[in-house]
Amino acid sequence: MSTPTLPEFQEQVSELLLRHRSLLDVLTKLSQASASVNRSVAKAITECGCISLSAHKQGFPADLSLDQALRQAQSHLSGKLCEHCRDMVISELGKNLFYMSALGNLLEIRLDEVLAKESRKCSTLGVFNLT
């Protein structure tokens, strides 16, 4: 089975979404799905231990070039997701994508257009797009 395109996936979601057709239902399910992504990552740290987090302030001297800052920046993450935790995070990201697609469907917004617009913005703004 080939990987569907974003429009194909959105169409599939549209055909499957029966219970949560209300905009408010979809918004709350998307929020819940996002929280579940965060929880699955937190459980990989706190319950499994396959990854660990060591967060601290990242100091960047004023005279540091952007290239140097990018090399110096850290994710605060150590380790690698085990197969079980990876499967859980993928599953939760999938639910998030499902409800994001459902929201796009209800608002008549195509995710491939969102992706293209965001990509153009990243290309145009470059480093000024940093958040």
Image: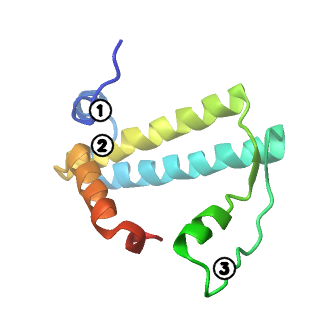
Kindly identify the residue that appears in the image at 66 percent across and 43 percent down.
40
User: In the rendered view, does 73 fall on the left or right side of 97?
Assistant: right
Residue found farthest to the top: 1
Kindly identify the residue that appears in the image at 47 percent across and 54 percent down.
31
Residue highlighted by disc 1: 13
Q: Position of residue 46 (x, y in %)?
A: 81, 47
- Proximity of marks 1 and 2: CB atoms separated by less than 8 Å: yes
Dividing the picture into quadrants, the one containing residue 14 is: top left
Ranked by sequence position, the earlier of labels 1 and 3 is 1
Secondary structure under the numbered disc 3 in the rendered image: loop
Q: Is residue 44 visible?
A: yes
Residue highlighted by disc 3: 60
Cα separation, mark 1 vs mark 2, equals 6 Å
Residue highlighted by disc 2: 102
Q: Position of residue 106 (x, y in %)?
A: 21, 48
Crowd band around label 3 with a 10 angstrom C-alpha radius: few (<14), some (14–19), many (20+): few
Seen from the viewer's position, the closer of residues 59 and 97 is 59
Ranked by sequence position, the earlier of labels 2 and 3 is 3
